[in-house]
């Protein structure tokens, strides 16, 4: 689990740890950190799509209350982004994107039918406290002195150029 802090975007205090799960078959009904049972938490995620397309997506994350960790499934996020940009601006599909934090529910509801400017929305954004990466090892027998090889996540299917 690598934890790193990126530069601050949102103007509200940081909230939640966050992990993007790149493995479609892993649902994380158990937390990858503490192995406790996870629940669900629906919050609008703030996503910056390059070069300059901020979006907020209301999304049902897995949530571990002990670790204060939200887990989003990459293939679901990319499906929602693809839907959104198919209508708005298809040339953006496949660009790099960063999931930066969460948007206050109230601001999200107000902004949902209007295009809200980036400076307006940033005053309602909580950056994540930390980002975690999910790694998966390949199952099977491994000699006790060896670390199991890492399983590469499958490539994106929809969010591609
Ligand atoms: Zn946990």
Image (cartoon, rainbow, N blue to C red):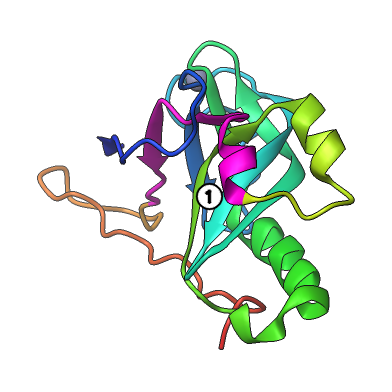
Q: Quadrant of residue 119?
A: top right
Q: Quadrant of residue 153?
A: bottom left
- Residue 65: where, in percent of width, then height? 59, 13
Residue 135 part of the magenta segment: yes
* 133 and 87: which is toward the camera: 87
As drawn, the residue found furthest toward the top would be 66
Residue at image point 53% right, 49% down:
21
User: Which residue position is annotated with label 1?
Assistant: 21
Vertical placement of residue 145 versus 67, above or below: below
Residue 41 part of the magenta segment: no
Vertical placement of residue 150 versus 69, above or below: below
Q: Left or right: 70 with respect to 141?
A: right
The magenta segment is: 118-136
- Residue 83: where, in percent of width, then height? 80, 70
> What SS does tag 1 mark?
strand
Residue at image point 56% right, 88% down:
161
Q: Left or right: 126 with respect to 133?
A: right
Q: Left or right: 77 with respect to 160?
A: right
Residue at image point 47% right, 70% down:
51
Vertical placement of residue 120 versus 68, above or below: below
Vertical placement of residue 142 versus 119, above or below: below
Count neighbours of disc 1 (C-alpha within 10 A) and say few if under 14, some if 14 to 19, many if 20 or more: many
- Residue 36: where, in percent of width, then height? 56, 17
Residue at image point 62% right, 76% down:
159
As drawn, the residue found furthest toward the left would be 145
Quarter of the picture containing the N terminus is: top left
* 65 and 35: which is toward the camera: 65
Disc 1 residue lies near ligand 1 with CB under 8 A: no
- Residue 70: where, in percent of width, then height? 58, 31
Tag count in the figure?
Answer: 1
């Amino acid at each position: 689990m690598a934890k790193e802090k990126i530069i601050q975007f949102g103007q509200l205090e940081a909230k939640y740890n966050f992990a993007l799960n790149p493995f479609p078959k892993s649902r994380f009904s158990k937390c990858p950190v503490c192995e406790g049972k996870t629940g669900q938490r629906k919050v609008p995620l703030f996503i910056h799509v390059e070069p300059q397309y901020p979006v907020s997506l209301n999304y049902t994350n897995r949530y571990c209350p002990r670790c204060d960790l939200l887990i989003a499934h990459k293939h679901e996020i990319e499906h929602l982004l693809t839907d959104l940009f198919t209508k708005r601006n298809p040339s953006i599909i496949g660009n790099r994107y960063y999931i930066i934090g969460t948007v206050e529910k109230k601001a999200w509801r107000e902004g949902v039918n209007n295009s809200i400017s980036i400076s307006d929305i940033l005053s309602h954004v909580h950056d994540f406290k930390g980002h975690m990466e999910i790694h998966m090892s390949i199952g099977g027998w491994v000699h006790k002195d060896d670390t199991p090889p890492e399983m590469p996540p499958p490539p994106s299917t929809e969010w591609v150029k």
